[in-house]
Image (cartoon, rainbow, N blue to C red):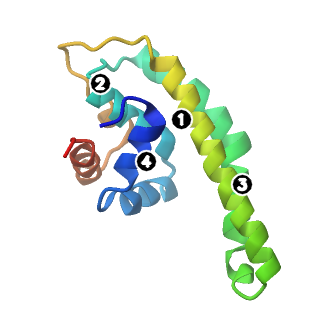
């Protein structure tokens, strides 16, 4: 698996079932960037702590609220109308690209915040802190295993 968070996230997201699971969790209020970061930290064997989780949430929450979510809401709001309006469809595609760029920026910020965190032999169960759905956790963990 890739060593940087962005590449790791792309590789995981492309695995069967991951996109659908992430979108479902996102619709339920989860921050998918934070989930993918947690999964990456698990793969790196970085121990989870309340302080570390809070640090990541302090980075992710404002960016999601102020940047990513407004772009996502606009993209979703234009979906139906864009089917019948080619110019609006082009603008919607640009909004979608900006949304992805904003998510990439968030992943890079999370990556930088965690780079110095060392691997450990202790439990590293990050996903339990963020995802209640056991099946979703198992699918995400399976997707993170190198092939």
- Mark pair 2, 1: CA separation: 16 Å
**Residue matched to label 4:** 10
- Viewer-closest of 15 and 48: 15
- Relative to 36, say whether 21 is above or below: below
Element marked by disc 1: helix
Rendered residue at 68%/42% (across/down): 65
* Residue 17 in the image, given as x and y percentages of width and height: 31, 62
Circle 1 crowding by C-alpha within 10 Å: few under 14, some 14–19, many from 20 = many
- Mark pair 1, 3: CA separation: 16 Å
* Residue 130 in the image, given as x and y percentages of width and height: 39, 38
| Quadrant location of the N terminus in the rendered image | top left
Comparing labels 1 and 4, the label whose residue is closer to the camera: 4
Rendered residue at 46%/19% (across/down): 114
- Sequence-wise, the earlier of marks 1 and 4 is 4
Circle 4 crowding by C-alpha within 10 Å: few under 14, some 14–19, many from 20 = few
Comparing labels 3 and 2, the label whose residue is closer to the camera: 2
Rendered residue at 44%/33% (across/down): 5
Q: Is residue 110 left or right of 93 when viewed as pictured? A: left
- Mark pair 1, 4: CA separation: 11 Å
- Mark pair 2, 4: CA separation: 16 Å
**Residue matched to label 1:** 107
**Residue matched to label 2:** 44
């Amino acid at each position: 698996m890739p060593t940087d968070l962005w590449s790791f996230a792309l590789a995981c997201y492309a695995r069967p079932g991951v996109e659908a699971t992430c979108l479902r969790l996102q619709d339920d209020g989860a921050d998918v960037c934070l989930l993918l970061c947690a999964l990456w930290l698990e793969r790196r064997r970085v121990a989870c702590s309340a302080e570390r989780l809070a640090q990541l949430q302090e980075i992710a929450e404002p960016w999601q609220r102020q940047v990513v979510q407004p772009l996502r809401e606009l993209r979703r709001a234009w979906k139906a109308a864009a089917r019948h309006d080619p110019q609006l469809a082009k603008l919607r595609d640009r909004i979608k690209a900006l949304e992805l760029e904003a998510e990439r920026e968030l992943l890079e910020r999370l990556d930088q915040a965690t780079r110095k965190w060392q691997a450990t032999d202790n439990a590293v169960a990050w996903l339990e802190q963020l995802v209640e759905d056991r099946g979703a956790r198992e699918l995400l963990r399976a997707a993170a295993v190198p092939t």
